[in-house]
Amino acid sequence: SPNGQRGIKGANPLRRRGSIGDRLDTMASQIGTLLHNVSASGRLSRRLVELHQERDAKREELNQTLRDLMEAEMNLRAEAEIQEEVMGTLKVEREAMKKCRDREGINRRRERNDLMMKVAFLIERIRNKEGRLVDLRCTGVPMAVLNTPVFGL
């Protein structure tokens, strides 16, 4: 330093030479400031540690929530796949039932047609045999059959 004065942080640079008492006061003040800063630094570092712990706890909580949501999503997807399989099976069964019902309906219509043709054939034989008109209601043929377009009643 110029003029042989040692540099003391915080000392007044305009004062060239001070008494030892002044220097000691200055040094004590500087030591107090340093102690205060160290103490504040300790408080700050404790607070920083607390903040890190809070952050880590929140992060773990969010990660757990995310894991729970992912597990729930997997379960829902598995359930949806099962439902799709069940629906596919039900659709196949429904189509099979429709085909069966349609076949049964076709067979019933054929049987009814065959029956009406037999009845018509028998009535024609009766008419031809007796040579006269026959009252169809006396033949024992159900009225539901007689009321069809084949007989025209």
Image (spheres, rainbow, N blue to C red):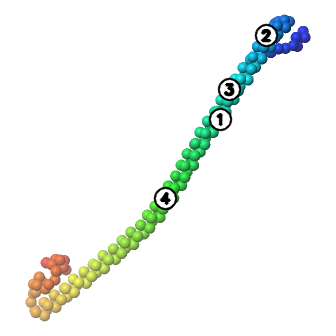
Mark sitting earlier along the chain (4/1): 1
**Proximity of marks 4 and 2: CB atoms separated by less than 8 Å:** no
Mark 4, Cα crowd under 10 Å, few <14 / some 14-19 / many 20+, is few
Label for residue 52? 1
Instruction: Say what amino acid the circle numbered 4 marks.
Output: Glu
Q: Which mark is residue 138?
A: none
Please indicate whether residue 140 sits to the left or right of residue 62 in the image: left
Do callouts 2 and 3 mark residues in contact (Cβ within 8 Å)? no
Location of residue 5 by image quarter: top right
Badge 1 crowding class, 10 Å Cα cut-off, few under 14, some 14 to 19, many 20 or more, is few
Label 4 sits on residue: 79
Residue 4: x %, y % from top left: 90, 11
Q: Is the C terminus in the top left, top right, bottom left or bottom right quadrant?
A: bottom left
Q: CA distance from mark 4 to mark 2?
A: 80 Å
Q: Are marks 2 and 1 in contact (CB under 8 Å)?
A: no
Which dot marks residue 43?
3
Amino acid identity at mark 1: His
